[in-house]
Image (cartoon, rainbow, N blue to C red):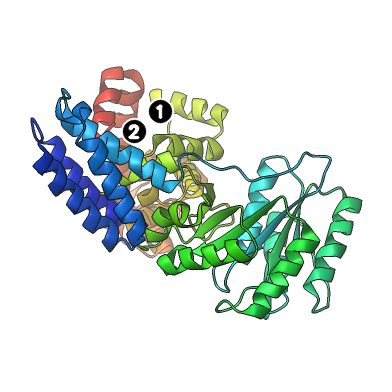
Amino acid sequence: MLDRISNKLNDVVRQVTGKASISEKNIQDAVEEIKIALLEADVNLRVVRRFVNHTIEEAKGEAVLRSVNPGQMFTKIVYDRLVSLLGDEKQDLVLKGPDTVSVVLMMGLQGSGKTTTSAKLAAKLIKEGRKPLLVAADLVRPAAIKQLQILGEQIGVEVYAEETKDAVKVVKNALGHAKKGGYDTVIVDTAGRLHLDQEMMAEIKAVHKAAQPSDTLFVADAMTGQHAVDIAKEFDEQVGIGGVVLTKFDSDARGGAALSLKSVTGKCVKYIGTGEKLTDLEVFYPERIASRILGMGDVVSLVEKAQESIDQEEAAALEKKMASSTFTLQDYLEQFARVKKMGSLQSMLEMIPGLSGQNLEDAIDEEELKHEEAIILSMTFQERENYRIISPSRRKRIARGCGLNVYDVNRLLKKFEKMKLMMKKMTKNKKYQAKMMSQLGG
């Protein structure tokens, strides 16, 4: 989502850091460029003014102008201001102890992604050792209850629903059901509207009073930009919100909502929706997002994604196979599945320092990777375990099986052979590992 503003800020920072010394004029020009970038990203005008004024004030201090490396000092100031803009530090979901039922109230306009986000949050809480109950309190949108029930079934979470038009009654009965069933967290999916109206606000206030939530999350569509900020402010004034969930963070939205919410509403973004899968809900870390905006990558998040998808024992066994040249096409196929769990290759490479903010479409051909997966799936298990037995006739059969041609099969086998050699070198040669990492910008 932040690609456009990231590219512009990177250009500005590179211009400043490329100078042996910087003057007040250089700083003024750089900050003016940053101002334009923020406005183009649909950041709130008052927020931009405040950001610019604070940056100029700090950047014109002696610490920068007399620094050994003024360019790097200027970059740090911009980074610190971005972190402050995004919320300083991550904000946790407010939950009570395990012996008490915690209620999380989800609210927002229709189409913002409340129902899917409710299920994503439930899936996340299960991983954290909690026992959530989903409550279908959206009694306005057709099929909202059915949608939540389907999502609940996919993640193995019970959905409490009733045939009624009284949302307050549903919530009260759901809380009683949660206590009897031993649930420690109740996530209430409420009704949204296409726009703010008094009927909507009256209902959400009544539901809020009945639920007595430990946390209230406003779900906003990042694609709506400043409109999301205005709506969040209205909800906070009338009902009160504890934090924000920004959905469609993986879209090509300009990023204005993420950069304005904290300053305008005083409420931080707690989670971001990064995809369509029910596992695609991430904790919002201001310092990591600021780092990605300035092209510094986000290695911590990348490692966390890897730890969630890759078992340590499996990783150790895989390393041994690489070192001993026993890595097979079956192993290669299994890596596809692990990488898919972590998200798209584009999103992962964005987290690597030096590659963040760059156009990587030419470097990554995801279509080719899909073809490679199809080719391997067309092989027998014996062929995957020992690619050397794949004769010309077998290659023709494999090509027919995956709908590609023999040339594609040959190319994959040659690539695999080179990759095995490179892996062996990497696992045995520390200098070679360092060289590879430096090429990736590490």
The residue singled out by tag 2 in the image is: 420
In-image side of 125 versus 23 (left or right): right
Q: Residue at x 72, y 50 (%)?
A: 214
* Callout 1 crowding tier (Cα within 10 Å): few <14, some 14–19, many ≥20: many
Indicate left or right for 50 with 161 as reference: left
Q: Are marks 1 and 2 in contact (CB under 8 Å)?
A: yes
Q: Which of marks 1 and 2 is nearer the N terminus?
A: 1
Q: Is residue 24 above or below residue 196?
A: above
Q: Name the residue under label 1.
A: 322
Residue beneath the point at 17% across and 24% down: 67
What x and y, as percent, mark residue 102?
76, 49
> Residue 110, how many percent across, how many down?
58, 74
Q: Under tag 1, what secondary structure?
A: helix
The amino acid type, in three-letter code, at marker 1 is Met
Residue at position x 65%, y 56% from top? 216
Which quadrant holds residue 389?
A: top left
Q: Which residue shows up at 40% across the image and 28% down it?
A: 322
Work out how far the residue at label 1 is from the one at label 2, CA to CA, in angstroms.
7 Å
Whether 375 is drawn above or below 298: the answer is below
Amino acid on which the number 2 mark rests in the picture:
Lys
Dot 2 lies on which element? helix
Q: Nearer the viewer, residue 311 or 196?
A: 196
| Front residue of this view, candidates 322 and 261 | 261
Q: Front-most of 78 and 334?
A: 78
Crowdedness near tag 2: few (<14), some (14–19) or many (≥20) residues, C-alpha within 10 Å: some
Q: Disc number at residue 221?
A: none
Can you give x and y, in whole percent of width and height, for residue 40 in the image? 27, 62
Figure check: 137 above or below 250: below
**Residue sitting at the far right:** 180
| Total labels drawn | 2
Q: Position of residue 156 (x, y in %)?
A: 73, 55
